Image (tube, rainbow, N blue to C red):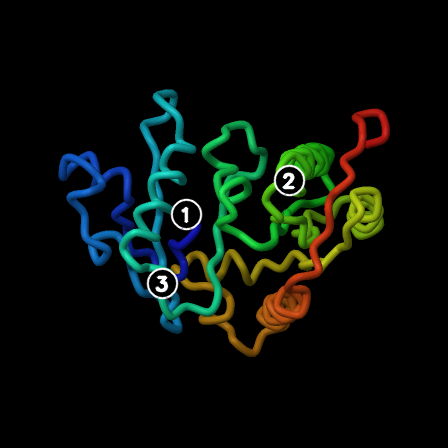
Amino acid sequence: DSTRLIVNGAEPDTVLHLAATEGSVEDLELEDVLKVGYRGIKCVESGGPEPGVGCAGRGVFTSINFLEENGAYNDVYYVSYDVLGDVVCGGFAMPIPENKAQEIYIVMSGEMMALYAANNIAKGILKYAHAGGVWLGGLICNERQTDRELDLAEALAARLNSKLIHFVPRDNIVQHAELIKMTVIQYAPDSKQAGEYRALAEKIHANSGRGTVPTPITMDEL
């Protein structure tokens, strides 16, 4: 679902699914899995096994290696990996220890379990920060309209030795765009919410190289 709206709802052919169909990942070509979406964004879905079977993190590992070997990263300005929020499987964390990323941005909200997951991810980043050089770029709060949500997000960012990059307000225009299989920027480019996403992108661009080594906190402190 990371790329669904960028490619206007087209069903993705995932790396793992096609590899299983063809026999192995070595039997695939880049054009088999790479889809070009809105504004020329190149999209690939790693895929995973059936629910309850195997390790989905393996798809991340396999996909990144396949993309590198087939030149998918040539002539691109930005590469973004969208991985599961709570790093419970080493495969999902693969961009961290393998130096596949420069900065990590944690998307969270003011709900307790989102704060808990963000702190857990910070622990994973700390484990590899000194060895790999992939640091925490900051937190991005995706508003759920909980009490004092902005205060909580800023406080957690400070305790993690980081900063709140952007507070994305909740707006039903997101759901309106989803219904017709578009991103907000494609659906309503002049809307306030589209402006929020552009502001977020500009802040991430300006923050390049300014990541920090996180300082996770205990459950009691959380």
x%, y% of residue 128? 62, 38
Q: Which residue is mark 2?
A: 125
Q: Secondary structure at mark 1?
A: loop
Foreground mark, 1 or 3, reads 3
> Dividing the picture into quarters, in which one does residue 211 lie?
bottom right
Residue at point 60% right, 67% down?
A: 201
Q: Residue drawn at (44%, 50%), measured in percent from left and top?
A: 2
Q: Which mark is residue 1?
A: 1
Q: Is residue 148 above or below residue 127?
A: below
Amino acid on which disc 1 is placed: Asp
Q: Secondary structure at mark 3?
A: strand
Q: Which residue position is annotated with label 3?
A: 42
Q: Percent x, y for residue 50? A: 32, 27
Q: CA distance from mark 2 to mark 1?
A: 24 Å
Quadrant location, the C terminus:
top right
Residue 19's spot in the image, x, y percent? Answer: 21, 39
Earlier sequence position, callout 2 versus callout 1: 1
* Precedes in sequence: disc 1 or disc 3: 1
The secondary element bearing badge 2 is classed as helix
Q: Residues within 10 Å of mark 3 (few under 14, many from 20)?
A: some
Q: Give the label, 3 or 2, closer to the camera.
A: 2
Taking 116 as reference, is 167 above or below it? below
- Left or right: where does residue 152 sit relative to residue 170? right
State whether residue 19 is above or below residue 13.
Answer: above
Q: Residue 103's image quarter?
A: bottom right
What is the x, y in percent for residue 30? 24, 55
Question: In the figure, is residue 207 to the left or right of 179?
Answer: right
